[in-house]
Image (cartoon, rainbow, N blue to C red):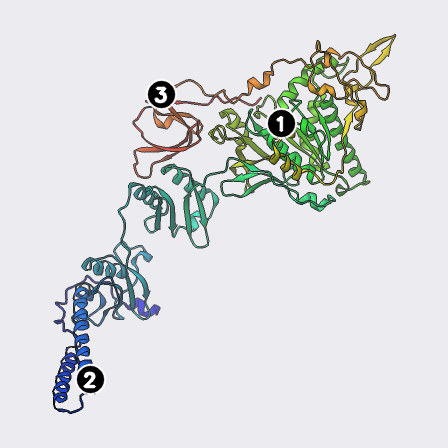
């Protein structure tokens, strides 16, 4: 076969062979014979006495004659429709004379005469039927010329569905009628051909309103897109060039890719319980995962503590951050984990103080300090056991430490430490260093942190500490500064739609940021008797086994020196006793002149067994003062600089771009790519800051635009 192919002459230009022989109506001879037989039989029937058997034969012969004439005329007219196409392709088939034997229609459709929908074409063995595109030649190949010449002379467009080079056979089929192409379809195809070359086979699907919804591509650029970076670049360019939010699904084995519009996401997803064993084994601990939320494809994204030991969650007021922490708490407790909670706002976890397997909920700053000290002491104890060989990692039970509103906690502990700092003590609260140690070392002692903060400012989270949180989740809309600190990009998470509680960005299994809707867990402290469904849902999330009963921190007893009471200092609080919860020791404080937090109803004035009432020290009194950290990290601050005007080449990702001067509409720039259709323009993809809807603006390089750049803070 290879030798025969090499001996084939070059493809010659088609030359006319003249007209085809005159057409003949097939079946006329048989029709005339049938008519004659009918006449003879009729004449004989006149002279026979018994004509009952002769007349039916005469009638049948006449019917046969009519049938042959009708279908002969039909075949004659069909051949007349096919002849122009035959004459157009005969010179390409190696024919030496005009003939109809090389092109036959095997299927007709539509009306009495119809159109040939399937045509069988034969050609001579010496014809060069190679595809010139295989060796880089630019002229059309044999198959393309056959299809083009035949279609030009017929009433419709034909396409080759089969080409058997061994048998020298081509099968053509009538292509379905094409609808008028919209500008969106044309642009989508142009973008694809710019990315994958002119040889790509493109199939564009449109919606009911003419918008492009899906584009399937069969290409021959497999090696080029075998790496992840070129694929990501292609997705980014395509999404920038077309309106809407797009994604790509790659099939590298068959050199296919499908671009499609991203599906809509649900506004709320309930946290569903998972069946757990009555015992938490080390193997179950290693496989344990916490569901974070559902992404746009309907896949659940997880936090895997054994792989990513600590999780950082950020989000402003009303973003759903606390609800996510409730989800994590209930999932930990249902899996029989030991759970400690640092309630930075003092009331966000009030409904979970009696929850099974939640040992401690620290609402007061001194109790919070004691809890962190206890977690650090437990870590050091386990390290000692591992070092001495007296225990193995599988012998330890996992501890989940949930820290809510870290910035608020840090500000309060600094103020409190100034009132209880003894002489010779460090200038800064030692507990802050303990927290850094936990972030660095706790994973090897089966202690895992979930840290919540409104935004990961360098003032509150240094670079090293932030890097120890491999699992991350940002909820609500981020400022450009927060996005840069969280995702190393000022554009990720800054255009999350408003009023979408629980909507945010997390890392998928490939460590890429994806948009998710986090699971929702009701807060029992905020429900009343009418919330029947929420109570029933919480009942399903309640652990069936209580492995770790509730515990309490007992306030240290003041020292008595020379009949004078000296309140406990910082180190006395860090060594306070932690015992089993005893409700009989709870004393309610009702002094309205000294307003205190609701957490003061806990045994804040209890000393060992001899409980006695004493005034609340001013050092630990929680006055209702404005929370400066809340105002500082409010998501309402836009975080952008002054107005600027300039060319489109001056803007960067994360900038705020004025996309409509008349309406005052702004958009957050997500990507900037050269326009594949207009070489003198840039395609800017942006998202509306209010709704989160994506948009595309093709801007000529000569146009003056208005924009604002984010004010990025340097890490200290």
Residue 112 coordinates in the image, percent (x, y): 21, 65
Q: Looking at this rendering, what residue extends furthest in the front direction?
A: 49
Distance from the alpha carbon under mark 3 to that under mark 2: 98 Å
Of the two numbered discs 1 and 2 in the rendering, the one whose residue sits closer to the viewer: 2
Name the residue that disc number 2 marks.
57
Of the two numbered discs 3 and 1 in the rendering, the one whose residue sits closer to the viewer: 1
> Residue 655 or 275: which is nearer the viewer?
275
Query: Up-down: is 236 above or below 525?
Result: below
Residue 592 coordinates in the image, percent (x, y): 70, 11
Q: Earlier in the sequence, mark 3 or mark 1?
A: 1
> Residue 485 or 44: which is nearer the viewer?
44
The quarter in which the C terminus is drawn is top right
100 displayed left or right of 309: left
Name the residue that disc number 1 marks.
526
312 displayed left or right of 621: left
Name the residue that disc number 3 marks.
645
Q: Quadrant of residue 670?
A: top left
Are the residues at dot 3 and dot 2 in contact (C-beta closer than 8 Å)?
Answer: no
Distance from the alpha carbon under mark 3 to that under mark 1: 49 Å
Considering the numbered disc 3 on the image, is that residue within a helix, a strand or a loop? strand
Residue 639 coordinates in the image, percent (x, y): 48, 21
Considering the numbered disc 1 on the image, is that residue within a helix, a strand or a loop? helix
Distance from the alpha carbon under mark 1 to that under mark 2: 97 Å
Q: Earlier in the sequence, mark 1 or mark 2?
A: 2
Are the residues at dot 1 and dot 2 in contact (C-beta closer than 8 Å)?
Answer: no
Of the two numbered discs 3 and 2 in the rendering, the one whose residue sits closer to the viewer: 2
Q: Earlier in the sequence, mark 3 or mark 2?
A: 2
Which residue does the image show at 37% across and 44% down from the upper left?
Answer: 195
Are the residues at dot 3 and dot 1 in contact (C-beta closer than 8 Å)?
Answer: no
């Amino acid at each position: 076969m290879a030798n025969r192919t090499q001996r084939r002459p070059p493809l010659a230009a088609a030359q006319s062979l003249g007209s085809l022989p005159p057409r003949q109506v097939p079946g006329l001879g048989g029709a005339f014979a049938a008519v004659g037989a009918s006449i003879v039989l009729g004449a004989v029937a006149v002279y026979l006495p018994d004509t009952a058997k002769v007349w039916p034969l005469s009638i049948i012969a006449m019917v046969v004659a009519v049938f042959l004439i009708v279908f002969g005329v039909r075949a004659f007219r069909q051949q007349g429709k096919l002849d122009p196409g035959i004459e157009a392709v005969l010179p390409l088939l190696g024919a030496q004379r005009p003939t109809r034997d090389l092109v036959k229609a095997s299927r007709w459709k539509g009306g009495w005469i119809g159109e040939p929908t399937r045509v069988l074409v034969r050609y001579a063995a010496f014809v060069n039927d190679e595809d010139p595109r295989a060796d880089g030649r630019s002229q059309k190949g044999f198959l393309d010329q056959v299809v083009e010449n035949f279609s030009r002379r017929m009433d419709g467009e034909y396409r080759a569905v089969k080409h058997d080079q061994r048998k020298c056979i081509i099968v053509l089929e009538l292509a379905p009628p094409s609808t008028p192409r919209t500008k969106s379809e044309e642009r989508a195809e142009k973008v694809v051909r710019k990315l994958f070359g002119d040889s790509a086979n493109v199939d564009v699907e449109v919606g009911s309103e003419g918008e492009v919804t899906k584009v399937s591509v069969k290409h021959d650029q497999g090696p080029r897109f075998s790496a992840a970076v070129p694929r990501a670049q292609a997705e980014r360019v395509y999404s920038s060039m077309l309106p809407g939010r797009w994604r790509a699904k790659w099939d590298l084995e068959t050199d296919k890719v499908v671009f499609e519009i991203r599906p809509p996401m649900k506004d709320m997803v309930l946290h569903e319980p998972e069946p757990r064993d009555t015992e938490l084994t080390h193997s179950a601990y290693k496989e344990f995962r916490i569901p974070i939320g559902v992404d746009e494809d309907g896949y659940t994204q997880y936090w895997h503590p054994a792989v990513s030991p600590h999780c950082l969650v950020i989000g402003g007021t009303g973003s759903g951050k606390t609800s996510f922490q409730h989800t994590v708490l209930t999932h930990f407790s249902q899996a029989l984990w030991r759970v400690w909670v640092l309630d930075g706002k003092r009331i966000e976890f009030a409904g979970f103080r009696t929850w099974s397997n939640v040992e401690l909920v620290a609402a007061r700053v001194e109790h919070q300090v004691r809890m962190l000290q206890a977690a650090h002491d437990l870590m050091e104890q386990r390290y000692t056991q591992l070092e001495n060989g007296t225990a193995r990692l599988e012998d330890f039970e996992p501890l989940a430490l949930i820290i809510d509103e870290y910035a608020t906690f840090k500000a309060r502990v600094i103020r409190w430490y100034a009132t209880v700092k003894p002489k010779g003590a460090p200038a800064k609260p030692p507990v802050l260093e303990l927290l850094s140690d936990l972030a660095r070392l706790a994973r090897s002692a089966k202690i895992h942190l979930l840290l919540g903060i409104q935004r990961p400012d360098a003032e509150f989270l240094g670079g090293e500490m932030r890097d120890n949180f491999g699992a991350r989740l940002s909820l609500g809309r981020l400022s450009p500064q927060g996005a840069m600190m969280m995702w190393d990009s000022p554009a990720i998470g800054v255009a999350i739609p408003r009023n979408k509680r629980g909507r945010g960005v997390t890392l998928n299994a490939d460590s890429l940021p994806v948009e998710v809707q986090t699971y929702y867990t009701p807060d029992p402290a905020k429900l009343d008797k009418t919330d029947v469904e929420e109570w029933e849902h919480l009942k399903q999330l309640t652990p069936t086994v209580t492995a770790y009963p509730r515990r309490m921190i007992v306030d240290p007893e003041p020292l008595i020196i020379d009949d004078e009471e000296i309140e406990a200092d910082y180190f006395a609080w860090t060594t306070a006793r932690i015992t089993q919860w005893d409700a009989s020791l709870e004393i309610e404080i009702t002094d309205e002149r000294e307003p205190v937090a609701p957490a003061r109803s806990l045994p804040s004035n209890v000393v060992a067994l001899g409980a006695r009432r004493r005034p609340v020290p001013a050092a630990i009194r929680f006055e209702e003062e404005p929370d400066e950290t809340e105002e500082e990290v409010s998501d309402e601050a836009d975080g952008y600089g002054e107005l600027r005007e300039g060319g489109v080449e001056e803007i960067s990702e994360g900038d705020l771009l004025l996309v409509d001067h008349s309406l005052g509409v702004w958009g957050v720039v997500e990507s900037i790519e050269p326009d594949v259709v207009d070489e003198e323009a840039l395609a800017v993809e942006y998202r509306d800051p209010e709704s989160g809807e994506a948009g595309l603006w093709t801007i000529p390089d000569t146009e003056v635009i208005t924009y604002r750049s984010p004010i990025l803070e340097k890490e200290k």
